Image (tube, rainbow, N blue to C red):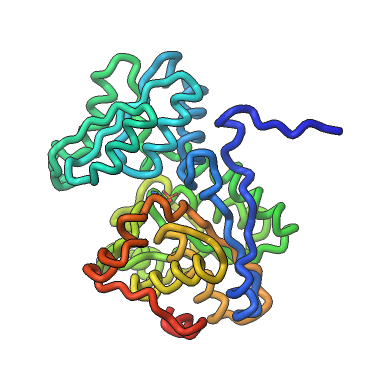
Amino acid sequence: MSKQINDGFCGTVGNTPLIRINSLSEATGCEILGKAEFLNPGGSVKDRAAMGIVEDAEAKGLLKPGGTIVEGTAGNTGIGLALVGNAKGYRTLIVIPETQSQEKINLLRAIGAEVRPVPAAPYKDPANYNHVDRRLADEVENGFWANQFDNTANRDFHFRTTGPEIHAQTGGEVTAFVASVGTGGTLAGVSSSLKEKNPKVLTVCADPYGAAMWSWFKHGHLDIDDGDSVAEGIGQGRVTKNLESAPVDEAYRIHDSVMIKMLYHLLVREGLFLGASSAINVCGAVKLALEKGPGQVITTILCDDGQRYLSRLYNPQWLKEEELDPAREGLDFLEEI
Ligand code: PMP
């Protein structure tokens, strides 16, 4: 009998299941398949970016034993970096705006990161946390700036792992891939990988309102960024280095009013307890299925789980304040996507 043992935290990142979303597959006549990235050991798709960035920095000698990983992030990347850091013997220093919830600060501290809250400032201001983290990495002894948005080790890790896993798990039958954009590492890396294996694979960006990626992929400019979304971890306004020359064929905008119905459908009918970006991704997959018709094998990302959003997406009072209504009749809401 061969042993099946993973090599610590780092050896457990990736190789996530690809889940058939039965109700939506049956309704559309397509295979709607979600890559269960919420089952990564740090709980999100960003464990892959953290691994890719840290391994690349080690290989290039930018991160040395006992060094400190520095990044500006309040979300899943910070969690991934802190846990990969623990497993590999690095300190993690996370810079975040003071406006972030105490819950997130507590979580990062609980898992071992040093958290440095800074006053909120616009991106163009040098006091913005995205610039403070870069300077801090220079000041801290043996500091390394992870730079998830423009460090293409993020995209490369998806190219090497997520893409090939999806190809293999579908027996090479995947016809489309849909993902929303935070850094763009997932969309760019997986799209390039799948197209390298089969140039006919259709690659699609699912954007929330208030972001500019739909505008970028549809029209080649960043001018249309109207509206807003409660989705965390996605909603990009510039072409990051990870997104540069990403082979993306199509883009959709998904409204929060239908995202929230999908989120609750996935929970109540499928037993999948997820965050908003996952629901936006699945809406994108269904939109493609309805537009292009039956027979496609459409894959997407289930980014993180619902526990991270108990006080928001799964709190009736908060939903009311945000004027979001999860009520729906069967699958009628699919027509609104
Ligand atoms: N969903 C969630 C919940 C995330 O935290 C992120 C990353 N910020 C994404 C989606 C998008 O992933 P990427 O950075 O690879 O575009």
| Image x and y of residue 330, in percent | 51, 82
Residue at left offset 35%, top offset 73%:
255
Residue 143 x/y as whole percent: 33, 20
Residue 165, placed above or below residue 53: below
Please say whether residue 57 is visible from this viewpoint: yes
Q: Position of residue 319 (x, y in %)?
A: 29, 68
Question: What residue is drawn where x is 31% and y is 40%?
Answer: 73
Q: Nearer the viewer, residue 218 or 141?
A: 141
Q: Horizontally, is 72 left or right of 99 in the view?
A: right
The N terminus, quarter of image: top right
Q: Residue 200: in sight, yes or no?
A: no
User: Dividing the picture into quarters, in which one does residue 316 lie?
Assistant: bottom left
Number of numbered tags placed on the structure image: 0
The residue located at (27%, 30%) in the rendering is 115
Quarter of the figure with residue 219: bottom left
Question: In this rendering, would 248 be left or right of 201?
Answer: left
User: Residue 129 vs residue 299: left or right?
Assistant: left
Q: Residue furthest right?
A: 1
- Which residue sits at x=50%, y=22%? 88
Q: Quadrant of the C terminus?
A: bottom left
Q: Position of residue 153 (x, y in %)?
A: 48, 37
